Amino acid sequence: MALTSDDVVRDPNGGIERLREIMRRLRDKNTGCPWDIEQTFATIAPYTIEEAHEVADAIERQAWGELPAELGDLLLQVVFHAQMAEEAGMFGFDDVARAISDKMLARHPHVFGAENRDKSAAQQTADWEKIKAVERGPSRVLDGVALGLPALTRAVKLQKRAARVGFDWPTTDEVLDKLREEMAELVEARDTLTEVEVIEEMGDLLFVMANLARHMGVDPEAALRGASAKFQRRFGKIEDWLAESGKTPAQSDLAEMDALWNRARAEDKLKKPE
């Protein structure tokens, strides 16, 4: 007996076909969900980015119990886009799966082909980039770096592309010199230039900061996420200590909160391993 749509969507072991059928039902013009029916690639794209960040957040926090659900949310975005494309006669989910499978085969000749696997991770990364360059075909050096990437990540990718053709500072010393130069220009802009020019100078400074992180082998997105988490944790302690006195931050002042901040910093240092 053939399975009905209800059989599929209510089967807890239905796997990816269950999810695809759920999405088909949600998008059905006559019986689906009005919100899902109204969505387009453009309206769903921000959710796709958000779900990817939530996966990264769960990993950063080592919240392994949350990770299956977060990965499921991200997988739903792929299924959603594929369903919309299928309805438009563009492509379907199987085409998405085929494209990435073919790409993995082509980019791993040392596993699926005749190439020797006896290479370092660095050499395999270099070979991967060569294969990607062939796939892209003739193009400008900085073409193909996605506009939708987080700004710091995109800055680093652009800089790496330029570095491959020799456009890069040889050491961190030159980057630090440039950082000092951009900081001075920002101070000047604050005092004498227009808002538009201040924004431009701030962008230049952040771009150099991303370059410094790259030269030092630091992921600037991860570093900034860590700093933000630390700020949130320490400010939370300030709130807790103020609450013990029956106060909120709005009822405090900068001097008191700064003293509590230093107390939180001192506690963090005591907790660090020797």
Image (cartoon, rainbow, N blue to C red):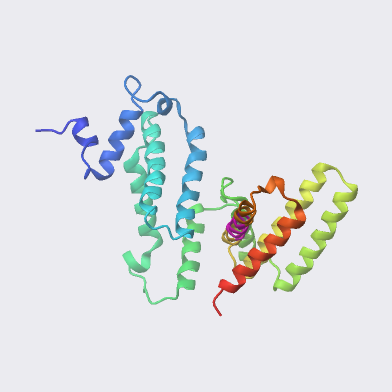
Q: Please tell me which residue is depicted at 57% across the width and 45% down the height of the picture.
A: 148
Q: Quadrant of the C terminus?
A: bottom right
Residue nearer the viewer, 156 or 270: 270
Left or right of 108, for residue 179: right
Q: Is residue 103 visible?
A: yes
Residue 224 part of the magenta segment: no
Most distant residue in the left direction: 1
Numbered range of the magenta stretch: 227-237
Residue nearer the viewer, 198 or 229: 229
Most distant residue in the bottom direction: 274
Residue 228 part of the magenta segment: yes
**Image x and y of residue 32, in percent:** 34, 24
**Image x and y of residue 203, in percent:** 73, 51
Left or right of 154, for residue 178: right
Residue nearer the viewer, 92 or 115: 92
Q: Please tell me which residue is depicted at 36% across the width and 46% down the height of the picture.
A: 72
**Image x and y of residue 229, in percent:** 58, 57
Q: Quadrant of the N terminus?
A: top left
**Number of residue marks:** 0
**Image x and y of residue 31, in percent:** 31, 21
